[in-house]
Image: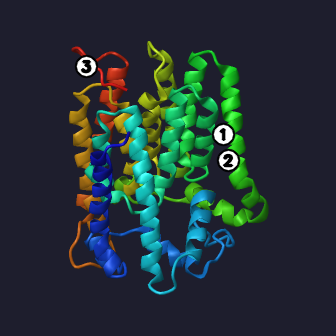
Amino acid sequence: MVSRSFIAAVFSSALLSFLKFNHCRLNDWASPDNYIHACYTDIPALFSERGLDTNTFPYLSATNSIEYPPIIGLGNWLISFITPAENSYRWFFDINILLITILFFGCALIVRKMQPQLTYLFIFAPAVIASLFINWDIWAVVTALLAIYYFDQKKFEPSAIWLGISISTKFFPIVLLLPIAVIFYRNKKLKDLSRYLFTTGIIWAAFNLPLMLTYFDGWWRFYKLNLERSADFGSIWYGLSLLNIDSPSLNLIYPLLSIGLFAGFTFYLIKLKKTPKLAQVALFAVVIFTTVGKVYSPQFVLWLTPLAVIALTNSRQQITFWLWQASEIIYHLSIWQYLALFTGAQFGLPDGGYVIAIALRVVGISCFTYVLMRDLAGTSTGKLSAISR
């Protein structure tokens, strides 16, 4: 049974996040004011920029379709029809944050099932509260968590269905297929792996094929943007560019580095003495993806934090968890002050300060991930105190 205190905790955090964004909500998200007050959100911005304010189908244009997979795109298109015409930007934002709050509650419930003693780490994580209403990532987080939960319960069919939905909402949950495949391989369940991949693929196709066949250019725009984008805000590549260290072959270096790191991750999983739970290793795949990617958006912490909480195996790991969270909140504040100066504000964060913030965040998540991987491999000194799962 869900306690009143649990419900109050979740909605208190959502309220704190709402209060953070409310300055922009009351001032029509004007720039650079939205960066100065750290309350920028994609939700009202894309409402007009992608034609949702006129109920335009979000995948009509090859050059201006919504840059998200179908569930987010079509979901927001449907929301546009119930958005009142008066103060439509605010109403569209309010309807979205109501839905996001409900999904945040769902995420907290799933984390609670997997890590009941530590759910508060997710609910009250400062970077999560600060980032909750930036955009729609939480839509995919809740379904990815369901996929992980059902997988560790050995309910592979519902897990595959939820993962297919998650990938159709935000594409990068596809990286979870790597640890899933290795776990099946270690357990000598290759037929189950084949069925899992087939089910995930069928679900993904059910959401994507209709758009691919009817509005291919609009559907493809999301993938095209990600394939062709240069070094973007928050990434290690952008930080290097601010130090005048350019990566002219980024579109070659990035995939090669990713493949190398995922290969190393695979080797690590195979060499573990015991087959891990997916909850223990899902974080590592997402850390690789987000750390070496061509962009790091502040809302990515909504992915990393619940995966971090369910990966914890002993109380001492919480020290590096909170150090990492501190680096995330420093980065969160830094990106907006950097963008404020970038967009013409009188004061803000210069290039050097932003590079330091990027470096701190990367060091924070890297140290935390190292501690988790070390402890899971059984190389930590001292006796580990297990946390109930």
Q: Badge 2 local density, few (<14 within 10 Å), some, or many (20+)?
A: many
Q: CA distance from mark 3 to mark 1?
A: 36 Å
Badge 1: residue crowd in 10 Å (few <14, some 14–19, many ≥20): many
Q: Which residue is mark 3?
A: 385
Q: Is residue 350 left or right of residue 188?
A: left
Quarter of the figure with the N terminus: top left
- State the residue position of label 1: 200
Give the structural element (helix, strand or loop) at label 1: helix
Q: At label 1, which amino acid type do we have?
A: Thr
Residue type, numbered disc 2: Trp
Cα–Cα span, label 3 and label 2: 40 Å
Q: Is residue 362 visible?
A: no
Dot 3 amino acid type: Ser
- Which residue is found at the position 42% from the left and 78% from the top? 90
Tag 3 near tag 1, CB within 8 Å: no
Can you give x and y, in whole percent of width and height, for residue 183 in the image? 55, 23
Instruction: Please say if 28 is above or below 353.
Output: below
The residue depicted at 25 percent of the width and 30 percent of the height is 317
Left or right, 331 with reference to 284: left
- In primary-sequence order, the first of circles 3 and 1 is 1
Q: Position of residue 195 (x, y in %)?
A: 70, 30
Q: Is residue 382 visible?
A: yes
Q: Which residue is mark 2?
A: 204
Label 2 – label 1 distance at C-alpha:
6 Å
Q: Is residue 160 above or below residue 9?
A: above
Q: Secondary structure at mark 3?
A: loop
